[in-house]
Image: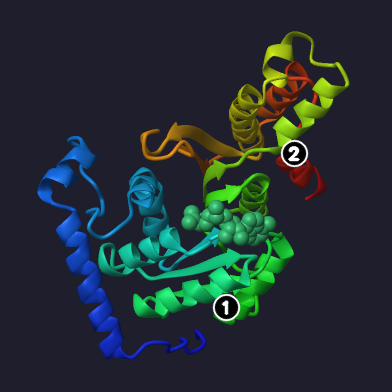
Amino acid sequence: MLPAPVVIASSHTRDRWATELAARARAYWTEARTAELARGKALLVPPAEAALQINHMLTLLAPALRELRAQHPVIHLLDAGCGRSYLTLLIAWCAKHVWAHPIEVLGIDRNAAVIEESRRRCALAQLDDVVRFEAEVLDTLDVIAAWARAFGSANAPVVHGVFALHACDTATCDALALGIALRAELIAVAPCCQAELARAWSALDARGDAGAFSPIWGAPHLRRETAAHITDAMRVLLVRAAGYEVKAMEFVPAEHTRKNTLIRAVKRSARDADALAAYEALRTATGGAGIALAARLASG
Ligand SMILES: C[S@@+](CC[C@H](N)C(=O)[O-])C[C@H]1O[C@@H](n2cnc3c(N)ncnc32)[C@H](O)[C@@H]1O
């Protein structure tokens, strides 16, 4: 049984908050603005009820989430690096009010202050019966312990989906490694601040090892941008190697945010040695530096 939810706001405060928020959102998201945003596409959740980026992300994840609902009487999801929990709360809200499907969601973040804030928002949104938050780092054993604390289960959790929206730099690799270690059927990450490879390339450049890459490695902007895409391509290959069907796609137009890549992975098959060989080939072709996910998977 779930531990009793933390009651932070009175029902009067919650009702007033919900009414005010709904009124403000309706006032801003006029029909014309909504039509311009949707550009002819059907939005799963109207923008008056959800922020732009997570709305698009949820639309792209909808088929995979439908599969999870078809297979599991209660779906268990983890939001890795949840921050203020926009995604966590939207998914939980949809499960409750749109899909009418039982769900348990755990939001994890190493920042205790944002976890407190997420608990407060969760209570205000009246989702605290299905969503829990724990201050923790994205390490597999720590997350398993956090799930047990949050939901009171004695056994290791069966986590069906792992999400990470803008988990900075190698935290996205941590989230992917976590999803693979937990054998999650769905893993979805929107990476940001991919700095690891750019740092390694900068060091190689300083040693005079750039060769044909010199125009890229020697120009910080080009180095950062190129490294971000190569990092994500390497992630795709490594997750494929772990037995997932993986797609990298744009999830929101670049004019809204440049951090607009979604890597969506669905567990389908056995390990894929060709994908691992392709990762090694890409690593070698781009100077030899690898990414944190390779090390995480090798040690796990
Ligand atoms: C840019 S914020 C994004 C937050 C949220 N997902 C969103 O999209 O609004 C990244 C979050 O990841 C958390 N984070 C980064 N590395 C982490 C780690 N190793 N373990 C747990 N949380 C981490 C940070 O504390 C921060 O709250």
Residue placed under numbered mark 2 in the picture: 294
Badge 2, how many Cα within 10 Å: few under 14, some, many 20+?
some
Identify the residue at image location x=36%, y=61%. Answer: 90
- Judge whether residue 29 can be spotted in this image: yes
Above or below for 147 versus 38? below
- Secondary structure beneath disc 1? helix
Residue nearer the viewer, 58 or 268? 58
The tally of labels here is 2
* Mark 2 Cβ and ligand 1 under 8 Å apart: no
Foreground residue, 178 or 269? Answer: 178
Q: Residue at x 50, y 84 (%)?
A: 2
Q: What residue appears at the point 21 percent right and 64 percent down from the top-left corner?
A: 24
Residue that label 1 marks: 150
The tag on residue 104 is none
Residue type for callout 1? Ala
Marks 2 and 1, how far apart at CA: 30 Å
Is the residue indicated by label 1 positioned so its CB lies within 8 Å of ligand 1? no
Q: Position of residue 203 (x, y in %)?
A: 82, 28
**How packed is label 1: few (under 14 Cα within 10 Å), some, or many (20 or more)?**
some
Residue placed most toward the observer, 164 or 253: 253
Q: From what the image shows, is residue 159 above or below residue 256?
A: below
| Side of 257 where 198 appears, left or right | right
Which residue appears at 38% of the width and 51% of the height? 54
Given residues 73 and 240, the one toward you in this image is 240
Query: Is 210 placed left or right of 276 in the picture?
Result: right
Please tell me whether mark 2 sits on a helix, a strand or a loop. helix
Asked which colour scheme the image uses, the reply is rainbow
From the top left corner, tell me how far across and down residue 178 is, in percent: 65, 54
Residue 163 seen by the camera: no
Compare marks 2 and 1 and give the one earlier in the sequence.
1
